[in-house]
Image (spheres, helix red, strand yellow):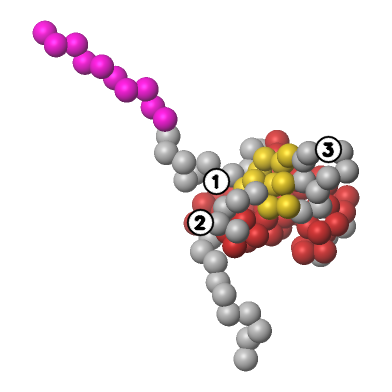
């Protein structure tokens, strides 16, 4: 009998595009694992920012703290997460960004009447 019963939906984009980009193109499989870890935590919190230190993410993913640190830097650079903390020693808040879900903002075109 499985111990975990809850499932979370994951956007097709994450596996069809993001995995290939982070693992294949960027050679950063740790970044993909960290993104999945934060994605799961954010989904459970109804997409609110996730409070997670390097140590917490490392324990949750099985990666080293240095690998998590590099992965977080890569995810911020690719604008897949946004991190903030109140001060240098505070636990950072990571907001998982899903730009593929946000509607594209296009300028509306005004047609002139003739």
Q: Position of residue 23 (x, y in %)?
A: 69, 52
- Residue at image x 88%, y 43%? 89
Q: Which residue is disc 3 drawn over?
A: 87
Q: Nearer the viewer, residue 17 or 63?
A: 63
Q: Marks 2/3: CA distance?
A: 33 Å
> Does any portion of residue 98 appear in the rendered image?
yes
Regarding mark 3 in the picture, which secondary structure is present there?
A: loop
For marks 1 and 3, give the CA distance. 26 Å
Hey, which quadrant is residue 5 in on the image? bottom right
Residue at coordinates 63% horizontally, 80% vertically from top-left?
4
Within-10-Å neighbours for mark 3: few <14, some 14–19, many 20+: few
Residues at marks 2 and 1 touching, judged by CB atoms closer than 8 Å: yes
Q: Is residue 15 magenta?
A: no
Residue plotted at (85% across, 57% down): 55
> Of the numbered discs in the image, which one, if any, rests on residue 11?
2
Q: Nearer the viewer, mark 2 or mark 3?
A: 3
The residue positioned farthest toward the front in the image shown: 86
35 and 49: which one is in front? 49
Q: In the image, is 103 to the left or to the right of 5?
A: left
The location of residue 71, given as percent across then percent down, is 77, 47
Of tags 1 and 3, the one toward the viewer is: 3
Which residues are the magenta region?
A: 105-114
Sequence-wise, the earlier of marks 1 and 3 is 3
Which of marks 3 and 2 precedes in the sequence?
A: 2
Residue at which label 1 appears: 98
């Amino acid at each position: 009998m499985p111990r975990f019963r809850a499932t979370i939906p994951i956007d097709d984009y994450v596996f069809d595009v993001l995995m290939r980009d982070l693992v294949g193109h960027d050679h950063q499989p740790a970044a993909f694992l960290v993104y999945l870890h934060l994605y799961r935590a954010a989904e459970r919190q109804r997409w609110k920012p996730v409070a997670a230190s390097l140590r917490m993410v490392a324990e949750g993913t099985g990666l080293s703290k240095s690998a998590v640190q590099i992965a977080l830097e890569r995810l911020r650079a690719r604008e897949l997460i946004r991190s903030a903390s109140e001060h240098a020693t505070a636990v950072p808040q990571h907001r998982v960004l899903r730009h593929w879900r946000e509607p594209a903002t296009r300028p509306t075109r005004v047609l002139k009447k003739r």
